[in-house]
Amino acid sequence: MVAKALLSTAELARELGDPELRLFDCTTHLAPAPEGSDDPYLVVSGLPGFEAGHIPGADYLDLQGEFSDQSTRLRFMLPSTAQLEAAFGRHGVGGHRIVLYSIGSMMWATRFWWMLRALGCDRATVLDGGFDRWVAEGRPTESGPSRGYPPATFRAAARSGLFVDRHTVLAALGRPDTVIVNALGPQFHAGREKSRYGRAGRIPSSVNVPAASLVDPQSKELISREEAVAKFAAQGVTRDKAVICYCGGGISATVDLLLLHELGHDRLSLYDGSMGEWAKDPALPIERD
């Protein structure tokens, strides 16, 4: 049985106040890097926005600050299991029900959802439409610092293969049983627009299902399952194939992964380095129109 990955705003409204619920704002912002910088962007914490307004009872998770590998210049890379166990435990996550949301783009929440799946946690769900949908419906918010949750013990049961490296991607190139999916916009997939990650273009033979095309721009909710099946099938992404998703920094591709999970795909991986690594290494092949 496929574990449910999405929660509606109406469902969350009914659960607020449940002592077993752990509710988190996962928002991060990306700002332009200074001229001449080798970094693709600056990572800006979403904590000020959280304190300005959040769903009642929520806590804030700082993706780059607490939940990423600090030993690499690549942003948002998956850290050790021990680091994640400690960080989630500090925020009160044990065997609790977890709801994740973000402001603006759902991708920050889906990134945390994918990390939790990799740790063996199937009790996490993403709020469909996020904080934007919640506010648009006139639902309650509060401001100020997080009250937090009591610390807990988080024990991972790590799953292999949900995060993969460039060696796995290289080995998958040209394999008929695997499809590599680029979640960036079509202009970046084609290599028609300069990439902030380095060389313009895509991983060879990869297909394009932009994460932005999977979200309704008005409601901020994911598109229907029927629409999603059609979009993926048009690019040769079918349930009989293994799927490796990538993007710029391993974030927006998790939107694709969540929808594929909801559609019943069970051989799903994220290339964590994505174009942040691939585009900078001249030894790795790149393709453009």
Image (cartoon, helix red, strand yellow):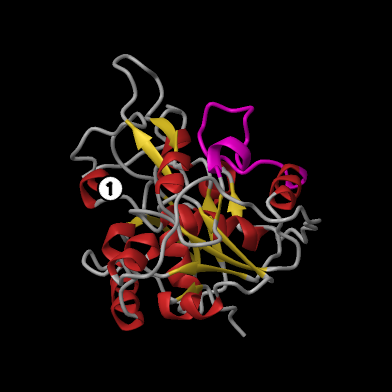
Is residue 52 covered in magenta? no
What residue is drawn where x is 62% and y is 85%? 1
Q: Position of residue 121 (x, y in %)?
A: 68, 65
- Region rendered in magenta: 62-82
Is residue 74 located in the magenta-colored stretch of the structure?
yes
Q: Is residue 244 visible?
A: no
The one nearer the camera, 56 or 201, is: 56
Q: SS for tag 1?
A: helix
**Which residue is at 40% across, 67% downward?**
140
| Residue 101 x/y as whole percent | 47, 60
Q: Nearer the viewer, residue 94 or 237?
A: 94
- Look at the picture and state if 144 lies above or below 254: above
Viewer-proximal residue among 219 and 192? 219
Quarter of the image for residue 221 reads bottom left
Instruction: Considering the whole magenta stretch, tell me its main secondary structure.
Output: loop
Q: Nearer the viewer, residue 10 or 158?
A: 10
Residue linked to disc 1: 189
